[in-house]
Image (cartoon, rainbow, N blue to C red):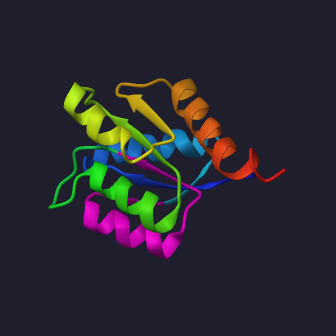
Amino acid sequence: MENPKILVVEDENSVALDIKNRLKKLGYTVAGTASTGENAIKKAEEITPELVLVDIVLKGEIDGIEVARYIHNNLDIPVVYLTAYADDELIERAKHTEPYGYILKPFQDKDLRSNIEIALYNKYIKYSN
């Protein structure tokens, strides 16, 4: 898949910009960014990216886990969590959204790339042959 479109859901502007720059450097197309769960769902419906990177803690009424649940259930777009949080309760909630990956911040570019590539492979290539 050439230049897949990725939606970045991150409520800290400087972190979102860093992720966006890293993705571009790795050869991905950043289809958009969102800082709230509500905006993330709206953008995912409008853009229909190939993948969504979502932080768990977001501004607004809807957290990243609820965003992932909605996207999984309604849009069938793979979600990879990109978060600083890994406590047992969050992981338990997150795994029920059937994410394609879970990356802990701070992260290396190779961690980002490998999770994205495996998610895209599992969603779009593995079963299409």
Which residue shows up at 28% across the image and 34% down it? 92
Nearer-the-camera pick, 81 or 6? 81
Nearer-the-camera pick, 49 or 30? 49
Image vertical order of residue 115 relative to residue 98, above or below = above
**26 relative to 99 in the view: left or right:** right
**78 relative to 107 in the view: left or right:** right
Q: Is residue 50 magenta?
A: yes
Residue 72 location in percent, x, y? 45, 57
* Region rendered in magenta: 32-54
Nearer-the-camera pick, 73 or 86? 73
Which residue shows up at 28% across the image and 55% down it? 66
Nearer-the-camera pick, 127 or 112? 127
Residue 80 location in percent, x, y? 46, 42
Which residue shows up at 37% across the image and 38% down it? 95
Which residue shows up at 58% across the image and 39% down it? 116
Residue 59 location in percent, x, y? 17, 55
Q: Is residue 35 magenta?
A: yes
